[in-house]
Amino acid sequence: MKIYTQHTSLWLRLTAALILILISGNIGYAQESNLVVISGRVVDQTSQQSLPGVSVKIKGTVAGTSTNEKGDFSIKTRLKFPITLIFNYIGFQQQEYVIKDASSKLNIELVTQTMLGKDVVVTASRVEENILKSPVAIQKLDIRTIRESPAPSFYDALENVKGVQMTTSSLTFKVPNTRGFNIPNNFRFMQLVDGVDMQAATLGVPLGNAIGPTELDIASVEITPGAASALYGMNAINGMANLLTKDPFVYQGLSIYHKTGVNHVNDPDHSASVLTESAIRYAKSFNNKFAFKVNASYMQGTDWISNTRLDQNPNNLKSANPGYPALNDANAAFDGWNKYGDDALAGSNLVSISGLNIDGKANQTLRVARTGYWENELVNPDVSNLKFDGSLHYKLNEKVQISYGYRYGKMGGVFQRGNKIRLDGVTVQNHSLEVKGSNFKILSYVSLENTGNSYNVKPLADNLDLYSGGSSSAWGTKYRNALTAYATANGGALTSSNLAAANNYARQIADASRVVPGTDAFNQLKQTIIGINNWDIKSSQIPDAPETGGAALLQRSRMYHTEGQWDLSKQVKIFDLLVGADARIYQIIPDGNNFVDFSRPIADRNKPLADGSFGDNVYYKKFGGFSQITKSFFDNTLKVFGSLRFDYNPEFDPKFTPRIAAVYSPTENHNFRFTYQQGYRFPALFEALSYVNNGRVKRVGSLSYINEGLGYLENSYTQASVINFNAAVSAAGNTDAAALQNRNLLEVANLPKARPEKINSFEVGYKSILANQKVVIDWDAYTNKYNGFLGQVQVYVPHGTTVGTDAAVLAMLDINRDPRTPNATTPNAASQGQDRYRVYTNAKNDYVNYGSALGITYNFYKRFALAGNASFNKLKSNKTDDIFVTGFNTPQWTTNVSFGNREIVKNLGFSVVYKWQESFLWESPLVTGTVPAFTTFDAQVTLRVPAYKANLKLGGTNVFNKRYIQYAGGPTIGALYYLAVTFDGLLK
């Protein structure tokens, strides 16, 4: 607590000092002139009806208000004339109006915006700019687009955005990605909510939809595909999504939302289930000086279920039994996509049964995976998500506003890291303090994480088997004895014809004491295991010993972040200049299982101290700063951008990140852009510092000092070579002599010292508005080159010896080798002789991917709109294999086509979206397999009832209920039908 208090106090003092310095430069303007009142009314140009809720702001300040029920507004100011007012309203073009004096009441007429192209974005360059003039590809979803999208939530609507690939791990957990190298816990794609990073640091996942804005508070979403590191720092090299919430000075009153839906319709994995979500928002402004807002929402339902019963260990793999097709048909070495405890491919649950006589051939070896458990037997599909946030906003004057925000999220669900994690009662809290001026912004926040009652699914399955079925060595002995007994009772020999039946009988006998899902014994043992914060499986060192392994996921860590930016354009004058800096500190509380105190001896790192802690807190830090110069030439037809960023992490060498871009606009409606940028990514917290006991494999971070005393960097063999080695030794009789004769198959890993991942990216693009504002074209193409790509590789370290020696070779033999093998060493020599590590490290090859995306929107008749986009992404092949599989995990082609009319008749609109995605190969340490192509249709009808300030939305996703998966090992997604009702603007 003392350390926590010290860091918090220091953080607050530094933030306060920075705030005072910048505010002091903006406080003196307030006496520029006497107080005047600017007032007026805003109406629809076509109907001449008044428009309530229009945002009215004074350009270059934080001063603003909104129109009342009659469309009237009033702003008090001390600024000197002329003053420019900016008017914004959903569905209408932004309008600027210059006021030279306050002598008369204004009458502003807004024009309906029928097309995109007039939107203003801030994410691409960290300053406001027209979306057509952005130097990089960017998409924006405003409130109207979100409301009219045939998606059950604004987050689901991201799937329809050009170039976005969505990975759905759970109803509560969705992660977007762009431009390749997709993983469910995406470290390369940043998610922000009002500038606050939504990454749950120790979990290693972004939680934008789980703890982010409610349906009622989202104002817009801006998505930038591709590298954004030059302005936003590390971990934004694939892209970013910026979720912007509603300003309580503009969006006032009470709003209520409720959605009822049903999923699992005609689902073989679960009966039809009801999903509900309710939300409430209230915002109030007082004298346009002080405002507050509060939001709350609660969702509950039955999650999509991962139950793909495919084998990722087909007969031709070395870890199967290619010499005995009948045995493979009987699934002896079955390694299911959504099954755990049967991990034959990884070798951790594979039992070698040696010295057998099959078809008259002596010394044959069979490889048998333990039975394991299906994911739906281990994971409760009930999920919920509670969200609450509130904020206070105070305008110190017309140019400076200070705000405090608090955000809380509690969730359940499933996500996939190296293994599947069942989230149960996970909470994340954010406290943020922001000071925003006309030319500067300072944001400081702290994120607090608590994983509640969550657990790791694979250790749960492993320990269920081991607690109730005995160690793998003991299980293998029972299996072998039963196999021999079956042969004796059926002609005295094992043959290809009876091998499958013998396997089934032997597995039944070996599994006799195994707890069965659904029984009281299973449920009691499961609860015991998920309550133990230790994933070690002791039998890997001491066969037949009582088991003490658990599956609990306990993480209680904090992240502190402060950033600021300052627009110095008025001071410099010859060009626009933006400068900024940021600092981030992760405070890791060791849990003895995922993160440890590395100053403690290796043998004690996972052991609690007398006070119950696992040692001193660990800190991971990074600091950075940037500058951006923008200059226009040739009557503003050419705009050039130059950015340079500096980042420093004490664990690595400092890095400089440049970005050079140009936007050429020969006419207002034709815009060509060219961008080159570099990007770096420091290893994420989990990639850098994890120290996970994960059964027979310890997952370790990339920092080199973790390796001290372990030897996995310099004294290890690759997993792939060990598998090939054991297959050859098995075929040769599984003797020590055969092992030494095949030693050349073992490949020394020689893992490099970790360094930041680097990307070089080049992008070109074109945006235009054609055909009298009826057609929008948005095209981009890119190529990326990755150097030092970060990923995971599994290696085997010979215990007590050095790679290359005879002892190291023999230590690589199968962990559960049968003691009756001729010339075997000792019954447990292999298991005592090797340690297994899954290491975060850099790839040795460079990787190049490239692609393009095209989006076209056409308003062809009245308010009918037809839109489509297509995306192409491709990974260039390398001539040599790397030390690990990088996992591009991206379909080559995806497309979306939408058709709709927001008001086909008065107050009634509809939209339909067709989505198609090509099949592709998904590669990960957990599951590797082909994701089939799929096609879905989403549809919705919206009815507005202005008299009751109500909006009804009836819709469905995947309305034809064509079940599909988005990634190998992920859940099967079916139809979701829903009805949502929103009351907006009450009690204004």
Image (cartoon, rainbow, N blue to C red):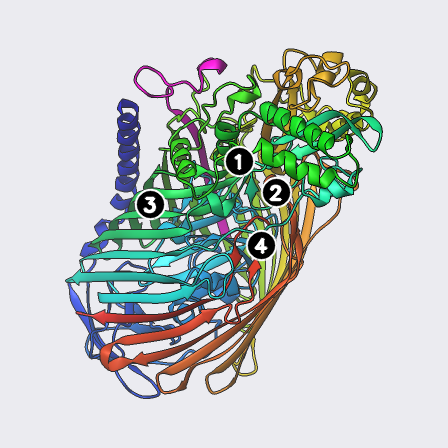
In the displayed structure, would residue 956 be above or below residue 535?
A: below
From mark 1 to mark 3, how far is it between C-alphas?
24 Å
Q: Which residue is mark 1?
A: 682
Amino acid type for the residue under numbered disc 2: Ser
Element at badge 1?
A: loop
Q: Residues within 10 Å of mark 1 (few under 14, many from 20)?
A: many
Q: Residues within 10 Å of mark 2 (few under 14, many from 20)?
A: many
Give whichever of discs 2 and 4 has the lower sequence position: 4
Which of 970/777 is in front? 970
Residue 829, numbered label: none
Give whichever of discs 1 and 4 has the lower sequence position: 4
Mark 1 vs mark 4, foreground winner is 1
Circles 2 and 4, Cβ within 8 Å, touching? The answer is no
From mark 4 to mark 3, how far is it between C-alphas?
26 Å
Q: Which residue is mark 2?
A: 924
From mark 1 to mark 4, how far is it between C-alphas?
24 Å
Give whichever of discs 1 and 3 has the lower sequence position: 3
Q: Which residues are magenta?
A: 600-629
Q: What is the quadrant of residue 448 in the picture?
A: top left
Mark 2 vs mark 1, foreground winner is 2
Residue 661, numbered label: 4
Residue 442, numbered label: 3
Element at badge 2?
A: loop
Q: State left or right for residue 797 relative to residue 907.
A: right
Element at badge 3?
A: strand
In the displayed structure, would residue 676 be above or below residue 513?
A: below
From mark 3 to mark 2, how far is it between C-alphas?
39 Å
Q: Residues within 10 Å of mark 3 (few under 14, many from 20)?
A: many
Amino acid type for the residue under numbered disc 4: Ala
